[in-house]
Image: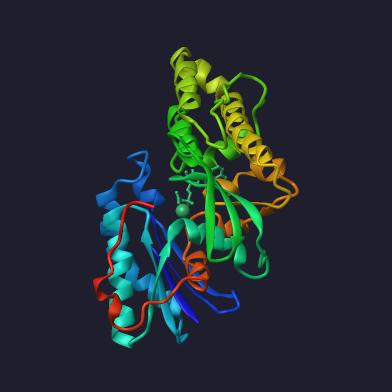
Amino acid sequence: MILGLETSCDETAAAVVSEAGEIVTNVVASQAALHARFGGVVPEVASRRHLELISPVIREALDGHEVDAIAVTVNPGLIGALLVGVSAAKAFAWAKRLPLIPVNHLHGHVASLYLQPLDLQPPFTCLLASGGHTMLLDVQDRGSYRVLGTTLDDAAGEAFDKGARLLGLGYPGGREIDLLARQGDPTACEFPVARVPGLDFSFSGLKTALLYRVRDLTPGELEARKADLAASYQRAIVRALVERVEATGAERVAVVGGVAANSELRAALPGAALAPLPLCTDNAAMIASAARYTEAVPYPGYLSLDARPTA
Ligand code: KG4
Ligand code: ZN
């Protein structure tokens, strides 16, 4: 049994996962409501909230279960937020004389596909689209991957969040746009799909295009056209993602990360293996899952282990 911890952004999460990849418990305390009034995650506020939540969240996830190892996200993410999880993991592992498994958050997202009942076997090409990253990965085995393409500017989730903010919707914006888009016409407005060479992505031009559209509207016009704008904007993001996936020519495709929860994206890739909805956004079950394919650091060698903001 592995206890996983995840605190890289604004979810305080702990989960217990078995060696076979069964989720025993999966607790996610989202801080989204706390950051909503700022329109995005405030790093210092996130760190302080993680500190308040980490012990009760771990207690709830453990729920009387005995564990054999502690897995924790060590990178990439907000450094202060990561440090709360890493410090808690060290303290817990050290007190129980257990090994500690340092996990990369992006590897965690991919490993959301390795949990039961999906239990996806490589090889496959993986689209990882979240609030912080947008990448195409070549996955040949469960322990590693090769980056085929990445975003040159904003991540897809960031494009959703910034777009939602321009439209006066709440944070996090992806879900808000997803819901509003269902009432709008996706062909109402033309948005540019960036043409960058190779398998890379670019979303900053799209965001600017929406900014100009919104700026030219009166408040009344914006209200009347909001759903159409949301639907057209979402269509442009989804089209950019799907085009790049298709450009790889891959037969076996998987999609993970917060944006994988998007209903239009899911419908646009009917043949793909999709991360289960509750495992798309940040959680600790995926971290414990990745830990099964990562080398553990035996007691007490991990006390000098550090969190890192970069991938
Ligand atoms: O993976 P995640 O929880 O955190 C990061 O690692 O960044 O992804 C969060 C991102 C946010 O940008 C959020 O707006 C987006 O995922 N998201 C969605 C949807 N649900 C969450 N984007 C589009 N449609 C959704 N339904
Ligand atoms: Zn994430």
* Left-right relation of 218 to 267: left
The answer to whether 184 is drawn above or below residue 35 in the figure is above
Residue 120: x, y in percent?
A: 67, 64
The answer, for residue 197, to whether it is visible in the render is yes
**Viewer-side residue, 21 vs 121:** 121
The image quarter in which residue 102 lies: bottom left
* Left-right relation of 198 to 166: right
The image quarter in which residue 208 lies: top left
The answer to whether 101 is drawn above or below residue 145 in the figure is below
Residue 292: x, y in percent?
A: 52, 74
Residue 65: x, y in percent?
A: 47, 85
| Residue located 35% across and 50% down the image | 34
The answer, for residue 169, to whether it is visible in the render is no
| Residue located 52% across and 16% down the image | 221
Q: Please say which color scheme the image uses.
A: rainbow
**Viewer-side residue, 166 vs 140:** 140
* Left-right relation of 172 to 228: left
The answer to whether 222 is drawn above or below residue 233 in the figure is above
- Marks counted in the figure total 0
